[in-house]
Amino acid sequence: MSNRNLRSDQLSSLYGRIELKNLWGSIGGNPWMRAYFGGAAQSVKLAQGKLDQFMAYRNQIAHRGAHYSTLGPSTVQDFVVFFRCLMGALSLALEDHVANFP
């Protein structure tokens, strides 16, 4: 895990190790995430894409490839809001999982 970026598939794999299935369904159904995406029914795919886009930006910045560019303040602020929603959704998914653990 430490040698990979924490993209959406890696996050699913990590939570799957504790038997938390359908992580992205829980995240996408979370009211904070749905509100972030304007109530979009496809919030699961949008949230996965947003996390994956963040990791792509991270890699461009870290490795300064040919497509490197600095992110503007509005993009950074948008990611701050996204991660606030994502962390809340992850916390609730984990709390629900632990509460229902056999």
Image: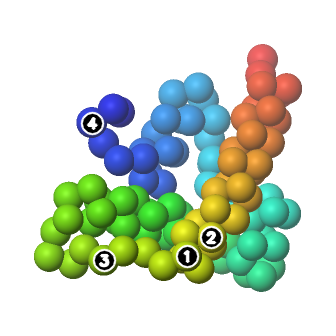
Let me know if residue 84 appears in the view. yes
> Residue at left 20%, top 65%?
64
> In the rendered view, how is the structure colored?
rainbow
Label 2 packing within 10 angstroms: few (<14), some (14-19), many (20+): few
Label 3 packing within 10 angstroms: few (<14), some (14-19), many (20+): few
Q: What amino acid does circle 1 point to? A: Pro
Labels 4, 2: front one: 2
Contact (CB < 8 A) between labels 1 and 2? yes
**Image spot of residue 59 (x, y percent):** 29, 59
**Disc 2 element:** helix
Labels 4, 3: front one: 3
**Image spot of residue 77 (x, y percent):** 62, 70
Contact (CB < 8 A) between labels 1 and 4? no
**Disc 3 element:** loop
Report the quarter where the C terminus lies.
top right
Contact (CB < 8 A) between labels 2 and 3? no
In the rendered view, does 44 fall on the left or right side of 93?
A: left
Q: Earlier in the sequence, mark 1 or mark 4?
A: 4
Q: What amino acid does circle 2 point to? A: Gln
Residue designated by label 2: 77
Give the spatial CA distance, label 1 vs label 3: 13 Å
**Image spot of residue 49 (x, y percent):** 49, 70
Give the spatial CA distance, label 2 vs label 3: 16 Å
Residue designated by label 4: 3
Residue designated by label 1: 73
Residue designated by label 3: 69
Q: Quadrant of residue 66?
A: bottom left
> Residue at left 73%, top 35%?
94
Q: What amino acid does circle 4 point to? A: Asn
Q: What amino acid does circle 3 point to? A: Ser
